[in-house]
Image (cartoon, helix red, strand yellow):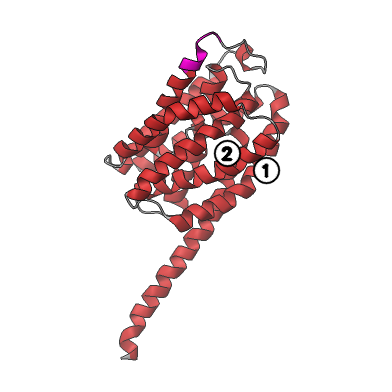
Amino acid sequence: MTGGLEPERNFTVSIALTLQTQIALASVSGVSIGFALGLVGGGAGMLSVPLLLYFVKVDDPHVAIGTTAAAIALTALVNLVSYARAGLVRWRTGAVFAAAGVSGAFAGSRWSLHIDGGAVLLLLAAIVAVVAVLMFSRPPAALGAALEPAPPGSGFATAGAGVAVGGVAGFFGVSGGFLSVPALHFIARVPMLEAVASSLVSVVVFGGTTAANYAMAGKVSVPLALALVAGGIVGGQFGMRSAKAMAVKGPALRRIFAAMLLAIAAYIAYRSIG
């Protein structure tokens, strides 16, 4: 009798050790994700999904997407508090952008659940690459801290951009910050560092909406999400300090943001095709 139970006991221990290993790896991943969120206010979702798939070894892309959404929302909330204490959040602009994007995030996340995970990742890589190229191609005069005042009616444009970004964030289960930051910077005329800080308002809202949809479909791993958040809190503090230090260097922060997105897009495409 004892001999017959031994294989089952060993199998149970093996599963437990695998989960423990995944949690540890997710914590390490969270440090990188939190640093990205603190540094550029976005792009972290694009970093999280491939890390969960290829580093933590999550089998289902949709579980990686749902878990990412939950973790990013919680991590962004912590970083948002830090930026708010520093007086860098444009609350009115960020709230308009986020509130308008809730419907987009809800619709996008519901749709994504019915699409093949590999196809979603390839689409994600293409969009991230386009945004990175656009960020790199801005004329040097547009990279400085000084911005022209927002034109009349820019509030409607900001709300429209929020709906579009919310839809993308919901569909891909990411933070949406990789689009929120340039949208707030170029449409709402918010300086780069404040755009990074203000984008976290939408990251929290979009991520929370998407995570709720995926959780109802059973596509969120709570232990892995909490591990990502724990690491993200640590990494976020270093990222925010780095962002403040680089803000005085003009285009440096934007170029780092664009380079990071381009590298992530190439890696997602490479692994998805492979």
Task: Indicate whether residue 154 is drawn in magenta.
Answer: yes
Secondary structure under badge 2?
Answer: helix
Q: In which quarter of the image is the N terminus?
A: bottom left
Q: Quadrant of the C terminus?
A: top left
Residue 96 or residue 22, whichever sits in front? 96
In this figure, which residue is indicated by the disc labeled 2? Answer: 37
The residue labelled by disc 1 is 238
Q: What residue type is labelled 1?
A: Phe
Give me the residue at 39% from left, 45% from top.
212
- Quarter-of-image position of residue 206: top left
Label 2 crowd bin: few (<14), some (14–19), many (20+), radius 10 Å: many
- The single residue placed furthest to the top in the displayed view is 152
At 41% from the left and 25% from the top, the residue drawn is: 163
Name the spot of residue 157 as percent of width and height, x first: 47, 16
Q: Up-down: is 52 above or below 114?
A: below
Q: Give the range drawn in magenta.
A: 151-157
Give the mark nearer the N terminus: 1 vs 2: 2
What percent of the width, then of the height, locates residue 172? 39, 37
Type of amino acid under label 2: Leu
Q: Residue 127 carries which label?
A: none
Foreground pick, 260 / 99: 99
Q: Is residue 160 left or right of residue 139?
A: left
Instruction: Determine the image quadrant of residue 121.
Output: top left
Relative horizontal placement of residue 9, taking residue 44 as reference (left or right): left
Q: Badges 1 and 2: C-beta atoms under 8 Å apart?
A: no
Is residue 179 in view from this perspective?
no
Cα separation, mark 1 vs mark 2, equals 10 Å
